[in-house]
Image (spheres, rainbow, N blue to C red):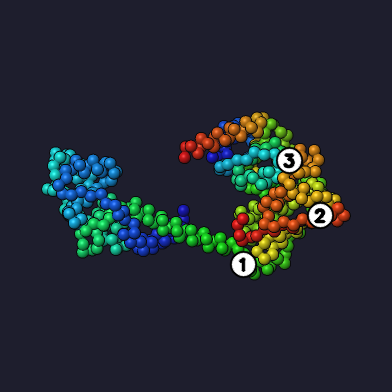
Amino acid sequence: MKLSKIIDKCRLEKIVFCTDCEVENGYCGDLMSDVMAHAEAECIWITIQAHKNSIAVALIKDIKSIVFTNNVMVENEVIKKAEEEKINLLRTNKDSFTVCGEIYCMMEAETAKD
Amino acid sequence: MSANYSKEKLTLVSELIYEIKVKEAMSKKVIFFKENTTFREIQLKLKEKKISGVPILDNVKNIIGIVTIDDIITAFDKGYVDKKITDYMSRDVITIPQNISVVSAIHKLERFRVGRLPVTESSDSKRIVGVITLSDILNRLLIVVQSIAEKVIDKEIKNTQISHDLMKSIAEKPLRFEVKGDDFNNAGRVASITKKYFQNLGVSKDIIRRIAIVCYEAEMNICLHSLGGSMTIQVRDNNAVIYAHDKGPGIPDVELALKPGFTTASEKIRALGFGAGMGLPNIKHYADKLEIKSSLQTGTELKAIINLGVKK
């Protein structure tokens, strides 16, 4: 599924949008070690951790898109780093549970179509 | 798709269609009828089996004719659909012998614009041993291409074992990093650079992923829990060897520190999503071998080994 479709349907705010990549799976987690160990490459990562280390983890794990939930503050230097590393940053005022549910349902519907 | 690309692909396929024999690709189960059948009976069978024609055989399975959907439509049109096929069927049947390559079958299917060819035992025999269609040929081609692809993949896996010479030259040039304590701004730098380093060597993705996780956790440990230290990443005997050394204060109980969930991290660190007590357990899980020496006087030395050739 295209990232733009998720952004559209879940009404995510685009903080950094550099590539409309294909998204096939996702991971939700706020613990860096957990995400390091379990997130799959190219997934969409849902988290409340909006700091520079999140970008570092995304970079190492080949995560192309991060969704920050609960409308967390995103510092300018985080945005700058994401732009440099071509990582999409999105934000929403919904909580992680709700956003995961929405994206999960969309992905299920997509697989059902195939 | 470039012209070159399609040409290349066609070379393999055209080689294969010369190699594959009709008998390897054909369906051996032949639906056939005898002469004393009506067009309507055949029509029902064609509909049921979703096929477009059947050969008509005699008692010893020699072919004497063929009835296709076209013939049945004509029979409906001219009003003899309930009559026996004997007087109406085409007796001029195009067949193909089983020991010829499928390229001849493809030519015949194209030239006579038919969907199926009855297959005879040999070129001077009329006995039917099978039927061949384009989709039978495609099926067989796919199976052969698949087995070729599998062999290529096997070969590639072997190739990811880096050559001896390259290994030697790399072993002389290890990566070295200073890691400061409490320096969150540079966290992840060691893992990032190390990842690129192994990508350039052509190491497989799965192994790079494990190296990156081990480096990241070791780096974060120095950054979060120590007064600072250094890391060295080296290739030795088909292994990635990751050393992390810090200046202290040391781990009082290494066994306990290796337990998932055990942490000494402060509230501030945990709020950032670190210090979940998963760092060392992650390293242990993703490394093939792990050694930790720690003393409260000299600090901690960690050595993790990941084999570059064999998948875990």
User: Which of disc 1 and disc 3 is earlier in sequence?
Assistant: 1
Q: CA distance from mark 1 to mark 2?
A: 35 Å
User: Which of disc 3 and disc 2 is earlier in sequence?
Assistant: 3
Residue B267, position as x, y percentages in the image: 80, 38
Give the residue type at disc 2: Ser
| Mark 1 residue element | loop
Residue B169, position as x, y percentages in the image: 68, 68
Q: Are marks 2 and 3 in contact (CB under 8 Å)?
A: no
Closer to us: B31 or B92: B31
Q: Answer few, some or many: residues within 10 Å of disc 2's Cα (few below 14, many 20 plus, some between 14 and 19).
A: many
User: Which of disc 2 and disc 1 is earlier in sequence?
Assistant: 1
Mark 2 = which residue?
A: B294
Depth check, mark 1 against mark 2: the one in front is 2
Q: Residue at x 79, y 53 (%)?
A: B179
Q: Residue at x 55, y 33 (%)?
A: A105
Closer to us: B35 or A19: B35
Q: Residue at x 47, y 58 (%)?
A: B149
Mark 3 = which residue?
A: B273
| Mark 3 residue element | loop
Q: Residue at x 81, y 54 (%)?
A: B294
Position of B84 with respect to A78 (left or right) is left
Q: CA distance from mark 3 to mark 1?
A: 40 Å
Q: Residue furthest bottom?
A: B165
Q: CA distance from mark 2 to mark 3?
A: 25 Å
Q: Are marks 3 and 1 in contact (CB under 8 Å)?
A: no
Q: Is residue B308 above or below residue B249?
A: below
The C terminus of chain B, quarter of image: bottom right
Residue A18, position as x, y percentages in the image: 62, 42
Q: Quadrant of residue B158?
A: bottom right
Q: Quadrant of residue A76?
A: top right
Mark 1 = which residue?
A: B163
Query: What chain does mark 1 sit on?
Result: B
